[in-house]
Image: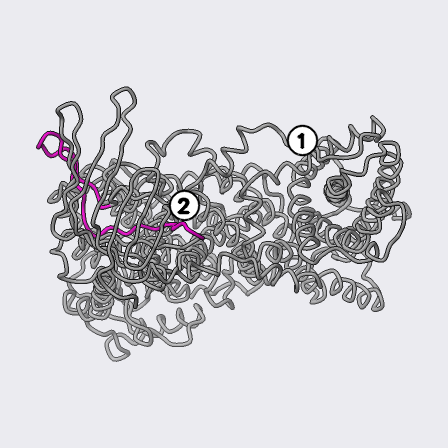
Amino acid sequence: MTTAPSAPDAGRNGLGLGLASGDDGRTHSAHTTSLFALLIGAVWATTSMVFYVLHTALPAGSVGRIPLIAMGSAAVFVLAVGIYACHPRLMMWRGGLMRLTDVDDPETMADMRALCRQAGLRSEPTFLVAPYDKTPKALVFGHPGRRCIQLSNRLLHTDGSLPELCRDTVLHELAHLRNRDVDKTYLTIAVWWSFVVTVVPLMLFLAVGRNSWGATPVAVSLAALTLLVYLIRNALLRNRETHADARAVVWAGASPHGVPLSALREALRQEKTGRFAWARRYWHHHPPPLQRIEIMNDPSRLVRPRLWDGFCVGIVTAVIMENGRFMLANFMPGSLNPSTLLTALLFTAPVTATLVFAVSRVVTAAAGRSSALAVAALPLVMGLGFLVGEAISLVNTGAGRWVLFSQYSRKDSFEPATVLTTVAPLLTGGLLLAVWARSAVNRTIGPRRRGLRRALIATAVLAATPWMTLWLTMRQEVDQTVAAALRKDAPAAVAMPAGLADGYATALAWTETLTLWPQRFLFFVGSYYVPGVLFGLGLLWLVPMVWTFLRHKAGLGGDSPFRDARGALAVAAAGTVVCLVVCVAHVLLARSAYRAAGAREDIEAWGSGSTAAFLAISVACEALAAGVTAFIAKRHRIVLALMTVFVMGTMMSVAVWVGAQPGNCVSYVGIMVEMCWEPLAADTAGLFWHAAILLGTLAAVPVVFLVAVARKVLGRRTSRVRASAPAKDGVPTVLPDRSPRAFSRVAFVLLAAAVAGPLVPAAFFNHHAWYVLAGDSAPAADCLLGTWVETAYRRTVPLDELGSLTFTRAKGVVHRFEREGTVTMDFGPATWERGSLNGHEAAYKYTGTLHLNYLVDGDRINYDDPVSEGSQTLFRDGEEYSTKPLLAQMTQSEEFSCSGDDLRLLSERYAVTLRRAGAAP
């Protein structure tokens, strides 16, 4: 019998894939688990939206929207669990399987037990024989604790010894058990068939049987979503086969023919592949024979990045984000911001996990010498998948036209400027996150890499979620974010005394222009009101450094982190000193300029100008210090550069908090009164700290990039050669880093604790200004609460040269304002809105109800997240023109005036008068 290689040899043969006989199979199950999670997410997002659309087709009041979605989604997964539970019995009944025992064939059972011991299984599966199966194959199935391996009669046909093909095939099936993919496999099949039986017929009904939702966009969307679920299912089933082959190769060792699994390889070569064998790599549920042989020859293929997986992740997460946010807004009425935060978490978790995991695979496959282009390709491919997922999300096609980013108010959301400026923050963030992950993972291949990967994934999720929340909040008003900033001139430098030296004034103006320009972005301003921004940035450098320190302390290899960390902290300290010197020089120059100017009426503006100058000087020093750190560090350059920025920004913020007031007094007052010794207000200092770290990080990106290019051009060696190192054949020997003394370790730990100290206040920084967790729960105006009935409605639509078209609506539309921040507009079975111009008549027929979240701000009502449970049909001269979901021509904001039982709503489009019909709840 062939014996397995020893554990160390197995680890080398497996190329670090976790294939040693002593591992637990989690490495191989990780990719299968991620595909299974993608499948469940895609099925849930599609199913929930299908039942939402179905609700609009049912008679009004027959069943609630949320109960229907919950029951429909639950029915799909309950049916899947039922199929999974019945599958083993069905397999045994259909195949007429019989149990193989020692009485039937003692030699074969002895060989089977030996193979189980070789595979390291804790419990042996039940071996079953398929007497009517004439093909040489085997299959593993069954529930936990009752695993079975089905062997065909032809595979077991022998004269008393286990044939090579049977041995290789059984090892392959045992590898499935060791990889823990059996349950996920049959749950995947069960979910697919449940989806086909329950959801696909509803899709056909909604796409073909109803014209009101725009048949073409919805049909294309539903077909694409079904195809996506099918492709993910097949990718999971192919993935489990290749991983089982890789593990079985390590177990098998060398056969009598000199090649592991030689009999199985030969059987695969003889298998007929058909005319379209290339398509099986992407379409079929089983990998083609040539691909399986390639994996057996080179298991390292399994750790190479799969761009197709990243593309699918982008599609699925976009579908989950769009459809899921719509569903969460329904399940959490009046809590728009918490639902947005939860949606952001549902999006960032799979995306960042896939990105970090893929980057680690790139680094592993390249043995720590990963290509920057290979890393950059990952977020770009995921971004492309995100755009495809956006386009096929049901919530973005249900309006009867194609919509991107839920921008229903735009005539064409596919405009290049809109797409570019909305996607640009996502692509930029993805690229920066991929570069960070490469820096954090680089040169850490080896034991405990799984724990490092998990820690980095959790860190990336915590750091990316606040920014994704901000993007979701502001993306519908793209003109206020990136697009508007691109169309504006660069901000001018803030006011300073006119007597400043020309050279210094010019340098200061350029510094402020280059470093403070992001302050014009609403995206940057909004980051101050989102929880966890600074905390996430701090974790991005703290977690990799702590992990590297623990690895080195445990003797798991790798260079000592002390030298690079000490160097980064030294650069941060020196940079802070230089920055303080420049700030003092600025105070003295401003003092002389102020006295030369001789005007005191602008003292307040000049004081603000000094604070802006301090910020610009700090950001410039942080960027330069980050570049120096990236140049001198041996590894983790991005991580250490970020640590340098964080440390310098914190120290400069403390210095400005304490010294800004005395500096301004020296510059502009001339005498030190008691108020001059007071520190800045806490809010002002907090804003400075927030801006110093964020702007410093942004400014450090191009500087570190230029340093990386310079290192490549100069060919700087990363290994350290001491002048006194011994030489061999005239070549100096590279000596390992010296281990620090115990005192140095203690000092480093204390210093690291002091450096990480600002993360504690960063976690709760500016909590009183957080609008993300506040939700739309602000108290509504008491007079609004209750039930109102429209008594008059008038809407004017300008038509350029033709004049304007005025619509009036029939009385009786009901508005119900609830205390938790929701409003329902009930149009009943039919409410008509009519208008005429130049002998032509236009009319709208409204049916059903419209739900919105609202927030009162002074004398204005702001609306968001409309949820339609009806339709609006446009008629032109009596002929039906189009039908869309009910939106009732609502605007996002309107003024209101409430007096007693009378309510008036006014916007730029319409004026509505209402009368109270029910008391406030």
Secondary structure under tag 1 reads: loop
Q: Crowdedness of circle 2 by 10 Å Cα count: few (<14), some, many (20+)?
A: many
- Residue 793 makes an appearance in the image: yes
Q: Which residues are magenta?
A: 858-886
Where's residue 470, x and y in %? Answer: 49, 49
- Residue 620 makes an appearance in the image: no
687 in the magenta segment: no
Where's residue 873, x and y in %? Answer: 16, 40
Q: Which mark is residue 314?
A: 2
550 sits left or right of 405 in the view:
right
Where's residue 42, x and y in %? Answer: 32, 53
- Circle 1 sits on which residue? 492
Q: Earlier in the sequence, mark 2 or mark 1?
A: 2
Q: Is residue 275 above or below residue 689?
A: above
Q: Quadrant of residue 416?
A: top left
860 in the magenta segment: yes
Please report contact status of discs 2 and 1: CB closer than 8 Å, yes or no. no
Kindly identify the amino acid type of the residue bearing the numbered disc 1.
Ala
Q: Closer to the camera, 647 or 858? A: 858
Q: Give the farthest residue toward the top.
A: 801
Q: CA distance from mark 2 to mark 1?
A: 39 Å
Kindly identify the amino acid type of the residue bearing the numbered disc 2.
Gly
Which is closer to the viewer, label 2 or label 1? 1
Please report the residue visible at 74 percent of the width from the left and 47 percent of the height from the top.
634
